Every structure is written in C-alpha cells, then in structure tokens.
Amino acid sequence: LTQWTAAEEEAGKRIRICFVARDDSTMCSQHLNVLYSPQPPLATASGYYSLPYCIDINVVPSTLHWLPPLAGSELGTPYLAHVGCQSSWLFSFSAGNYTAEIAWSSDTQMLP
C-alpha cells in the first residue's frame, strides 16, 4: 500500500504516478529476457519486474465559501458584547468535496 498526499502547490495540476512490481524469483531471468527485450530487462538476477503501471491524478483545489447569512466580513463587522451576557453569531461555509472546520484565526486575541 502506497499513500500520497497532494501538496497545496499541486492544486489544479495533473500528477502522473507510476509503479513497478517485482518478485524475488531468479528462475526465469535467463528465459524471459530472450522472449522480451525491453530496456532495462524485465527478468534479472534480483527477480522479475513488471511493466510500469501509471495513474494520472487530477488534484482538485479546495473550495471554501462562506455562506449567507453571515455575521462578519473580511474587514470586520462591529458588534456589541455586553459584560455578563453570552453573545453568539452564526458563521457557516461550504467546503465542496472536503471535510473542513471553522477555527479561531491565529491573529485572534481572545482571553481564555
């Protein structure tokens, strides 16, 4: 099993990934090289190698969109919070094909 995670800079690109399988048999190394003559040889003293098997992966960028009604903006929206009263505002978004969550921005200054 091989795992791969697309990097952010690969969004929107097509990535080709190729695999080669190898067994550990040395029995066929002399016989198969006579039948097949690709370079490098399919059968070696280290085992028999498959032909490459490739897949093309289209890396889909994430698509986060804030959904209305929205209690805020990129520039900041003023609201009042009264001492001793609990305040709440609704923020929702769509993440397309992704699982995502809303978190505090790193520059938010909130007391614990």
Image (cartoon, rainbow, N blue to C red):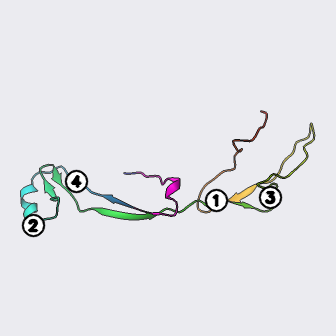
Q: Residues within 10 Å of mark 1 (few under 14, many from 20)?
A: few
Q: Amino acid at mark 1?
A: Ala
Residue at the front extreme of this rendering: 75
Q: Check disc 3 and give the amino acid type.
A: Leu
Q: Amino acid at mark 2?
A: Leu
* Percent of width and height locating residue 10: 49, 58
Q: Which residue is mark 3?
A: 70
Residue at position x 47%, y 52% in the image: 5
Which quarter of the figure has residue 32?
A: bottom left
In the figure, is residue 85 to the left or right of 97?
right
In magenta stretch: residue 4: yes
For the stretch drawn in magenta, what is the main secondary structure? loop
Residue 11 left/right relative to 35: right
Provide the residue designation for mark 2. Answer: 35
The numbered mark at residue 104 is none
Residues rendered magenta in the picture: 3-15
**Which of pointers 4 and 3 indicates the residue nearer the eye?**
3
Labels 1 and 3: the sequence-earlier one: 3
Q: Secondary structure at mark 4?
A: loop
Task: Say whether marks 1 and 2 touch (CB < 8 Å).
Answer: no
Report helix, strand or loop for mark 3: loop
- Please name the residue shown 92% across and 37% down the image: 83
| Element carrying mark 1 | loop
Which callout, 4 or 3, points at the residue further toward the start of the chain?
Answer: 4
Residue 109 horizontal side relative to residue 17, left or right: right
Name the image quarter holding residue 17. Answer: bottom left
Give percent across and percent down for residue 84.
92, 37
Q: CA distance from mark 1 to mark 3?
A: 16 Å
Binning the other alpha carbons within 10 Å of mark 3 as few (below 14), some (14 to 19) or many (20 upward) gives: few
Of callouts 3 and 2, which one flags the residue occurring earlier in the amino acid sequence?
A: 2
Disc ID at residue 22: 4
Q: Is residue 78 above or below residue 97?
A: above
